[in-house]
Image: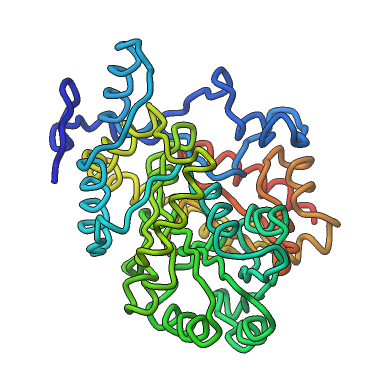
Amino acid sequence: MTYSQPGVPAAGKLAAEEFDFGVVHDRSQFGSAKWANQWDEFSPRVEGEGLISLWTADMDFRAPEPVIARLREAVNHGIYGYTKRDLRHYEIVKSWFERRHNWDVDMATLLPAPAIMPSVAAILRTFTQPGDGVIVQAPVYSPYFQVVRDNNRTLLINRLRLVEGDYELDLDDFERLAANGARAFLLCNPHNPAGKAWTREELESLDSLCERYGILVISDDIHCDIRLNDRPHVVFSTIGEGAAAKSFICTAPTKTFNLAGVPSATLSVADSKRREELFRVMQASFMVNANFFGRIALEVAYTSGDQWLDHLTPYIRNNVNLVLSWAAESLPGISPIRPDASFLVWLDAREVDAKVGGVHRFFVERAGVNLYDGRVYGPGGEGFIRLNVGCPRSVLEEALARMASALSPL
Protein backbone atom coordinates (compact mmCIF):
# COMPACT_ATOMS: atom_id res chain seq x y z
CA MET A 1 0.00 0.00 0.00
CA THR A 2 1.25 3.49 -0.86
CA TYR A 3 -0.51 6.36 0.82
CA SER A 4 -0.22 10.00 -0.08
CA GLN A 5 -1.85 12.74 1.90
CA PRO A 6 -2.82 15.97 0.10
CA GLY A 7 0.33 17.98 -0.45
CA VAL A 8 2.58 15.08 0.61
CA PRO A 9 4.91 13.50 -1.98
CA ALA A 10 4.28 9.80 -2.49
CA ALA A 11 7.15 7.54 -1.50
CA GLY A 12 8.08 6.82 -5.11
CA LYS A 13 8.54 10.55 -5.86
CA LEU A 14 11.01 11.41 -3.13
CA ALA A 15 14.14 13.17 -4.28
CA ALA A 16 17.58 11.72 -3.67
CA GLU A 17 18.54 14.58 -1.36
CA GLU A 18 15.77 13.52 1.01
CA PHE A 19 17.86 10.43 1.79
CA ASP A 20 21.01 12.38 2.64
CA PHE A 21 21.83 11.06 6.09
CA GLY A 22 25.22 12.79 6.10
CA VAL A 23 23.89 16.24 6.96
CA VAL A 24 24.75 17.40 10.48
CA HIS A 25 21.86 19.16 12.24
CA ASP A 26 22.08 21.35 15.33
CA ARG A 27 19.46 19.88 17.67
CA SER A 28 20.23 22.02 20.70
CA GLN A 29 17.64 24.72 19.92
CA PHE A 30 14.74 22.28 20.33
CA GLY A 31 15.60 20.77 23.71
CA SER A 32 17.28 17.56 22.56
CA ALA A 33 17.82 15.33 25.60
CA LYS A 34 20.50 13.44 23.69
CA TRP A 35 22.63 16.49 23.02
CA ALA A 36 21.94 18.02 26.42
CA ASN A 37 23.40 14.78 27.82
CA GLN A 38 20.53 14.65 30.29
CA TRP A 39 17.49 12.40 30.02
CA ASP A 40 15.10 14.91 31.61
CA GLU A 41 15.07 17.77 34.07
CA PHE A 42 14.89 15.29 36.96
CA SER A 43 18.00 13.32 35.94
CA PRO A 44 21.70 14.01 36.44
CA ARG A 45 23.55 15.54 33.52
CA VAL A 46 26.76 14.18 32.04
CA GLU A 47 29.11 17.16 32.10
CA GLY A 48 31.86 17.80 29.59
CA GLU A 49 33.06 20.39 27.11
CA GLY A 50 32.21 19.75 23.46
CA LEU A 51 30.80 16.27 24.06
CA ILE A 52 29.79 14.12 21.10
CA SER A 53 26.53 12.54 22.25
CA LEU A 54 26.10 8.95 21.10
CA TRP A 55 24.23 7.55 24.06
CA THR A 56 20.42 7.53 24.15
CA ALA A 57 18.50 5.80 21.36
CA ASP A 58 17.25 8.45 19.03
CA MET A 59 18.86 9.29 15.69
CA ASP A 60 20.29 12.54 14.34
CA PHE A 61 18.40 12.21 11.05
CA ARG A 62 15.35 14.05 9.83
CA ALA A 63 12.20 11.97 9.66
CA PRO A 64 10.89 10.94 6.23
CA GLU A 65 9.90 13.96 4.14
CA PRO A 66 6.26 12.87 3.74
CA VAL A 67 5.95 12.81 7.54
CA ILE A 68 7.51 16.26 7.86
CA ALA A 69 5.30 17.66 5.09
CA ARG A 70 2.08 16.34 6.58
CA LEU A 71 3.02 17.50 10.09
CA ARG A 72 3.82 20.92 8.63
CA GLU A 73 0.37 21.02 7.06
CA ALA A 74 -1.15 20.09 10.40
CA VAL A 75 0.85 22.82 12.17
CA ASN A 76 -0.23 25.40 9.60
CA HIS A 77 -3.83 24.28 10.02
CA GLY A 78 -3.47 25.80 13.48
CA ILE A 79 -6.20 23.85 15.28
CA TYR A 80 -4.84 21.08 17.48
CA GLY A 81 -7.99 19.72 19.02
CA TYR A 82 -8.96 16.24 20.08
CA THR A 83 -8.32 13.64 17.43
CA LYS A 84 -9.31 10.03 16.90
CA ARG A 85 -8.10 6.97 15.07
CA ASP A 86 -10.42 5.46 12.48
CA LEU A 87 -10.50 2.02 10.88
CA ARG A 88 -7.98 3.14 8.31
CA HIS A 89 -5.45 3.80 11.08
CA TYR A 90 -5.45 0.12 12.02
CA GLU A 91 -5.43 -0.95 8.36
CA ILE A 92 -2.23 1.07 7.97
CA VAL A 93 -0.62 -0.67 10.95
CA LYS A 94 -1.66 -4.08 9.65
CA SER A 95 -0.34 -3.32 6.17
CA TRP A 96 3.04 -2.22 7.51
CA PHE A 97 3.66 -5.42 9.42
CA GLU A 98 2.38 -7.59 6.58
CA ARG A 99 4.76 -6.20 4.01
CA ARG A 100 7.78 -5.60 6.26
CA HIS A 101 7.61 -8.66 8.53
CA ASN A 102 5.13 -11.07 6.97
CA TRP A 103 2.94 -10.72 10.05
CA ASP A 104 -0.71 -11.04 9.09
CA VAL A 105 -2.02 -9.51 12.29
CA ASP A 106 -5.74 -9.66 12.93
CA MET A 107 -6.98 -6.06 13.20
CA ALA A 108 -9.42 -7.13 15.89
CA THR A 109 -6.45 -7.75 18.21
CA LEU A 110 -5.08 -4.20 17.93
CA LEU A 111 -5.27 -1.61 20.69
CA PRO A 112 -4.02 1.99 20.60
CA ALA A 113 -1.37 3.14 23.03
CA PRO A 114 0.54 6.33 23.79
CA ALA A 115 3.95 4.59 23.85
CA ILE A 116 5.41 1.20 24.72
CA MET A 117 6.62 1.60 28.30
CA PRO A 118 3.35 3.06 29.63
CA SER A 119 1.68 0.08 27.95
CA VAL A 120 4.02 -2.37 29.67
CA ALA A 121 3.17 -0.76 32.99
CA ALA A 122 -0.55 -1.05 32.25
CA ILE A 123 -0.20 -4.72 31.32
CA LEU A 124 1.66 -5.47 34.54
CA ARG A 125 -0.93 -3.64 36.64
CA THR A 126 -3.77 -5.46 34.91
CA PHE A 127 -2.54 -9.05 34.90
CA THR A 128 -0.13 -9.32 37.82
CA GLN A 129 -0.38 -8.53 41.52
CA PRO A 130 2.04 -6.68 43.80
CA GLY A 131 4.88 -9.03 44.64
CA ASP A 132 4.45 -11.20 41.54
CA GLY A 133 7.66 -12.11 39.75
CA VAL A 134 8.51 -10.64 36.36
CA ILE A 135 11.41 -12.08 34.34
CA VAL A 136 13.74 -9.81 32.38
CA GLN A 137 16.84 -10.92 30.46
CA ALA A 138 19.86 -8.83 31.42
CA PRO A 139 21.76 -7.00 30.22
CA VAL A 140 18.67 -5.20 28.94
CA TYR A 141 17.00 -1.83 28.39
CA SER A 142 17.08 -0.19 31.81
CA PRO A 143 13.43 1.00 32.05
CA TYR A 144 12.46 -2.68 32.33
CA PHE A 145 13.93 -2.70 35.82
CA GLN A 146 12.08 0.49 36.71
CA VAL A 147 8.69 -0.59 35.39
CA VAL A 148 8.85 -3.81 37.40
CA ARG A 149 10.13 -2.33 40.65
CA ASP A 150 8.11 0.88 40.62
CA ASN A 151 4.92 -1.10 40.12
CA ASN A 152 5.79 -3.19 43.20
CA ARG A 153 6.47 -6.40 41.30
CA THR A 154 9.45 -8.66 42.00
CA LEU A 155 12.30 -8.35 39.51
CA LEU A 156 13.63 -11.73 38.38
CA ILE A 157 16.80 -11.49 36.30
CA ASN A 158 17.56 -14.21 33.76
CA ARG A 159 21.16 -13.49 32.70
CA LEU A 160 21.94 -13.99 29.03
CA ARG A 161 25.16 -15.89 28.28
CA LEU A 162 27.79 -14.22 26.11
CA VAL A 163 29.37 -16.98 24.04
CA GLU A 164 32.00 -16.09 21.45
CA GLY A 165 30.59 -12.64 20.86
CA ASP A 166 26.92 -13.63 20.73
CA TYR A 167 24.22 -13.78 23.36
CA GLU A 168 22.49 -17.06 24.09
CA LEU A 169 19.53 -17.95 26.29
CA ASP A 170 20.07 -19.59 29.65
CA LEU A 171 16.98 -21.77 29.61
CA ASP A 172 17.87 -23.68 32.77
CA ASP A 173 17.99 -20.45 34.75
CA PHE A 174 14.81 -19.23 33.05
CA GLU A 175 13.02 -22.39 34.16
CA ARG A 176 14.32 -22.00 37.70
CA LEU A 177 12.83 -18.50 37.84
CA ALA A 178 9.62 -19.64 36.16
CA ALA A 179 9.15 -22.40 38.70
CA ASN A 180 9.60 -20.00 41.60
CA GLY A 181 6.65 -17.70 41.16
CA ALA A 182 7.16 -15.78 37.93
CA ARG A 183 3.90 -14.48 36.51
CA ALA A 184 5.13 -12.49 33.49
CA PHE A 185 8.12 -12.28 31.16
CA LEU A 186 9.21 -9.03 29.54
CA LEU A 187 10.78 -10.01 26.21
CA CYS A 188 12.97 -7.55 24.30
CA ASN A 189 12.69 -8.57 20.62
CA PRO A 190 15.07 -7.59 19.07
CA HIS A 191 17.16 -7.37 22.18
CA ASN A 192 18.44 -4.00 23.34
CA PRO A 193 21.36 -3.27 23.85
CA ALA A 194 22.95 -5.97 21.69
CA GLY A 195 20.56 -5.85 18.72
CA LYS A 196 20.02 -9.60 18.93
CA ALA A 197 17.20 -10.91 16.73
CA TRP A 198 15.82 -14.00 18.44
CA THR A 199 15.30 -16.99 16.18
CA ARG A 200 12.05 -18.92 15.92
CA GLU A 201 13.71 -21.83 17.71
CA GLU A 202 14.81 -19.62 20.60
CA LEU A 203 11.35 -18.09 20.92
CA GLU A 204 9.76 -21.55 20.80
CA SER A 205 11.99 -22.65 23.67
CA LEU A 206 10.88 -19.65 25.73
CA ASP A 207 7.25 -20.21 24.77
CA SER A 208 7.42 -23.83 25.91
CA LEU A 209 8.61 -22.80 29.38
CA CYS A 210 6.08 -19.99 29.64
CA GLU A 211 3.31 -22.40 28.68
CA ARG A 212 4.44 -24.95 31.27
CA TYR A 213 4.47 -22.43 34.11
CA GLY A 214 1.56 -20.19 33.08
CA ILE A 215 3.65 -17.11 32.34
CA LEU A 216 2.37 -14.18 30.26
CA VAL A 217 4.72 -12.72 27.65
CA ILE A 218 5.03 -8.97 27.05
CA SER A 219 7.07 -8.52 23.88
CA ASP A 220 8.66 -5.14 23.15
CA ASP A 221 9.30 -5.07 19.38
CA ILE A 222 10.22 -1.41 19.04
CA HIS A 223 13.58 -2.09 17.31
CA CYS A 224 12.22 -4.62 14.82
CA ASP A 225 12.24 -2.57 11.61
CA ILE A 226 15.91 -1.72 10.98
CA ARG A 227 17.18 -5.11 9.79
CA LEU A 228 20.93 -5.26 9.31
CA ASN A 229 21.21 -8.81 7.96
CA ASP A 230 18.98 -11.46 6.46
CA ARG A 231 17.75 -12.74 9.83
CA PRO A 232 14.00 -11.98 9.89
CA HIS A 233 12.06 -10.49 12.72
CA VAL A 234 9.95 -13.23 14.30
CA VAL A 235 6.92 -11.87 16.14
CA PHE A 236 6.40 -13.99 19.26
CA SER A 237 2.67 -14.43 18.67
CA THR A 238 3.28 -16.00 15.24
CA ILE A 239 5.02 -19.12 16.53
CA GLY A 240 1.78 -20.81 17.55
CA GLU A 241 -1.72 -20.39 18.91
CA GLY A 242 -0.53 -20.87 22.46
CA ALA A 243 2.09 -18.15 22.05
CA ALA A 244 -0.51 -15.78 20.63
CA ALA A 245 -2.93 -16.48 23.48
CA LYS A 246 -0.43 -15.65 26.20
CA SER A 247 1.30 -12.64 24.60
CA PHE A 248 1.06 -8.88 24.29
CA ILE A 249 2.97 -7.55 21.26
CA CYS A 250 4.05 -3.92 21.66
CA THR A 251 4.99 -1.95 18.53
CA ALA A 252 5.76 1.65 17.60
CA PRO A 253 7.31 3.57 14.68
CA THR A 254 9.28 5.86 16.96
CA LYS A 255 12.73 4.22 16.75
CA THR A 256 12.36 3.33 13.08
CA PHE A 257 11.49 6.82 11.84
CA ASN A 258 13.00 8.96 14.63
CA LEU A 259 9.64 10.02 16.04
CA ALA A 260 10.22 9.66 19.79
CA GLY A 261 9.02 13.22 20.36
CA VAL A 262 5.67 12.54 18.63
CA PRO A 263 4.92 9.12 20.08
CA SER A 264 2.20 6.68 19.14
CA ALA A 265 2.10 2.92 19.61
CA THR A 266 -0.01 -0.14 18.89
CA LEU A 267 -0.54 -3.30 20.91
CA SER A 268 -1.70 -6.67 19.62
CA VAL A 269 -3.55 -8.80 22.19
CA ALA A 270 -4.95 -11.99 20.68
CA ASP A 271 -6.89 -13.17 23.73
CA SER A 272 -10.18 -11.28 23.55
CA LYS A 273 -10.91 -11.40 27.28
CA ARG A 274 -7.48 -10.04 28.18
CA ARG A 275 -7.74 -7.45 25.43
CA GLU A 276 -11.02 -6.14 26.84
CA GLU A 277 -9.67 -6.13 30.37
CA LEU A 278 -6.51 -4.27 29.36
CA PHE A 279 -8.50 -1.75 27.35
CA ARG A 280 -10.63 -0.96 30.40
CA VAL A 281 -7.52 -0.32 32.48
CA MET A 282 -6.00 1.85 29.75
CA GLN A 283 -9.23 3.82 29.50
CA ALA A 284 -9.28 4.32 33.25
CA SER A 285 -5.72 5.65 32.99
CA PHE A 286 -6.67 7.97 30.10
CA MET A 287 -4.17 6.22 27.83
CA VAL A 288 -6.25 5.70 24.69
CA ASN A 289 -6.85 9.26 23.48
CA ALA A 290 -4.78 9.88 20.36
CA ASN A 291 -1.98 12.43 20.30
CA PHE A 292 -2.80 14.80 17.43
CA PHE A 293 0.68 14.78 15.89
CA GLY A 294 1.61 11.23 16.93
CA ARG A 295 -1.34 9.73 15.08
CA ILE A 296 -0.49 11.61 11.90
CA ALA A 297 3.20 10.71 12.11
CA LEU A 298 2.46 7.00 12.55
CA GLU A 299 0.04 6.85 9.64
CA VAL A 300 2.25 8.68 7.16
CA ALA A 301 5.43 6.87 8.25
CA TYR A 302 3.81 3.46 7.90
CA THR A 303 2.37 4.30 4.48
CA SER A 304 5.09 6.43 2.86
CA GLY A 305 8.22 5.56 4.86
CA ASP A 306 9.35 2.35 3.14
CA GLN A 307 11.71 4.01 0.70
CA TRP A 308 13.27 6.19 3.40
CA LEU A 309 13.81 3.12 5.61
CA ASP A 310 15.29 1.18 2.69
CA HIS A 311 17.87 3.94 2.27
CA LEU A 312 18.49 4.37 5.98
CA THR A 313 19.22 0.69 6.61
CA PRO A 314 22.39 0.39 4.49
CA TYR A 315 23.61 3.70 5.91
CA ILE A 316 23.26 2.29 9.43
CA ARG A 317 24.86 -0.99 8.32
CA ASN A 318 27.87 0.89 6.96
CA ASN A 319 28.14 2.84 10.21
CA VAL A 320 28.19 -0.45 12.10
CA ASN A 321 30.90 -1.71 9.76
CA LEU A 322 32.88 1.46 10.44
CA VAL A 323 32.77 0.81 14.18
CA LEU A 324 33.93 -2.77 13.69
CA SER A 325 36.78 -1.62 11.45
CA TRP A 326 37.95 1.05 13.89
CA ALA A 327 37.74 -1.40 16.79
CA ALA A 328 39.87 -3.96 14.97
CA GLU A 329 42.52 -1.43 13.98
CA SER A 330 42.56 1.41 16.52
CA LEU A 331 40.49 0.61 19.62
CA PRO A 332 42.48 -1.92 21.64
CA GLY A 333 40.44 -3.63 24.33
CA ILE A 334 37.12 -2.83 22.61
CA SER A 335 35.16 -5.71 21.03
CA PRO A 336 31.90 -4.75 19.29
CA ILE A 337 29.01 -7.19 18.99
CA ARG A 338 27.55 -6.93 15.50
CA PRO A 339 23.79 -6.26 15.82
CA ASP A 340 21.14 -8.04 13.76
CA ALA A 341 18.82 -5.04 14.06
CA SER A 342 18.63 -1.44 15.33
CA PHE A 343 21.11 1.44 15.22
CA LEU A 344 22.87 0.48 18.45
CA VAL A 345 26.23 -1.28 18.89
CA TRP A 346 27.09 -3.00 22.17
CA LEU A 347 30.79 -2.71 22.92
CA ASP A 348 32.60 -5.16 25.18
CA ALA A 349 35.07 -2.83 26.88
CA ARG A 350 35.76 -4.88 30.00
CA GLU A 351 39.50 -4.90 29.36
CA VAL A 352 39.62 -1.10 29.17
CA ASP A 353 37.19 -0.75 32.07
CA ALA A 354 39.51 -2.75 34.31
CA LYS A 355 42.46 -0.54 33.38
CA VAL A 356 40.82 2.84 33.79
CA GLY A 357 38.32 2.16 36.58
CA GLY A 358 35.22 3.06 34.57
CA VAL A 359 35.17 3.08 30.78
CA HIS A 360 32.17 5.36 30.40
CA ARG A 361 33.69 8.13 32.49
CA PHE A 362 37.04 7.57 30.76
CA PHE A 363 35.61 8.31 27.31
CA VAL A 364 33.68 11.32 28.60
CA GLU A 365 36.72 12.86 30.24
CA ARG A 366 39.52 11.76 27.89
CA ALA A 367 37.73 11.67 24.54
CA GLY A 368 34.75 13.99 24.92
CA VAL A 369 32.40 11.20 23.83
CA ASN A 370 29.29 10.33 25.81
CA LEU A 371 28.22 6.71 25.36
CA TYR A 372 25.73 4.74 27.44
CA ASP A 373 27.31 3.11 30.48
CA GLY A 374 26.67 -0.64 30.31
CA ARG A 375 26.07 -0.80 34.04
CA VAL A 376 22.61 0.71 33.63
CA TYR A 377 21.59 -2.43 31.70
CA GLY A 378 21.89 -4.54 34.81
CA PRO A 379 23.92 -7.66 35.58
CA GLY A 380 26.18 -8.54 32.68
CA GLY A 381 26.49 -4.93 31.55
CA GLU A 382 29.50 -4.10 33.70
CA GLY A 383 32.41 -2.96 31.56
CA PHE A 384 30.28 -2.58 28.43
CA ILE A 385 29.21 0.59 26.65
CA ARG A 386 26.45 1.17 24.09
CA LEU A 387 27.21 3.25 21.02
CA ASN A 388 24.45 4.87 18.94
CA VAL A 389 25.43 4.87 15.24
CA GLY A 390 22.24 6.64 14.15
CA CYS A 391 24.19 9.75 13.23
CA PRO A 392 26.02 11.26 10.24
CA ARG A 393 29.15 9.31 9.38
CA SER A 394 31.35 12.36 9.92
CA VAL A 395 30.13 12.62 13.53
CA LEU A 396 30.75 8.92 14.11
CA GLU A 397 34.24 9.12 12.57
CA GLU A 398 35.15 12.05 14.81
CA ALA A 399 33.93 10.17 17.89
CA LEU A 400 35.87 7.04 16.97
CA ALA A 401 39.01 9.08 16.30
CA ARG A 402 38.71 10.71 19.71
CA MET A 403 38.22 7.33 21.36
CA ALA A 404 41.27 5.92 19.56
CA SER A 405 43.38 8.88 20.67
CA ALA A 406 42.26 8.43 24.26
CA LEU A 407 43.16 4.73 24.21
CA SER A 408 46.55 5.09 22.55
CA PRO A 409 48.54 5.90 25.75
CA LEU A 410 47.15 2.90 27.67
In the shown orientation, is residue 56 left or right of residue 301?
A: right
The answer to whether residue 394 is above or below residue 315 is above
Residue at the image point whose x is 58% and y is 59% from the top: 124
The answer to whether residue 299 is above or below residue 142 is above
In the shown orientation, is residue 144 left or right of residue 187?
A: right
Residue 38 shows in this picture: yes
Residue 162: % across, % down:
62, 77
Residue 329 shows in this picture: no
The answer to whether residue 32 is above or below residue 93 is above
* Structure colour scheme: rainbow
Residue at the image point whose x is 73% and y is 58% from the top: 152
Locate the C terminus and report the quarter of the image it occupies: bottom right
Residue at the image point whose x is 77% and y is 42% from the top: 366
Q: Quadrant of residue 84?
A: top left
Residue 91: % across, % down:
21, 47
Residue 251: % across, % down:
40, 53
The answer to whether residue 84 is above or below residue 376 is above
In the shown orientation, is residue 162 left or right of residue 219?
A: right
Count of residue discs = 0
Residue 277: % across, % down:
45, 57
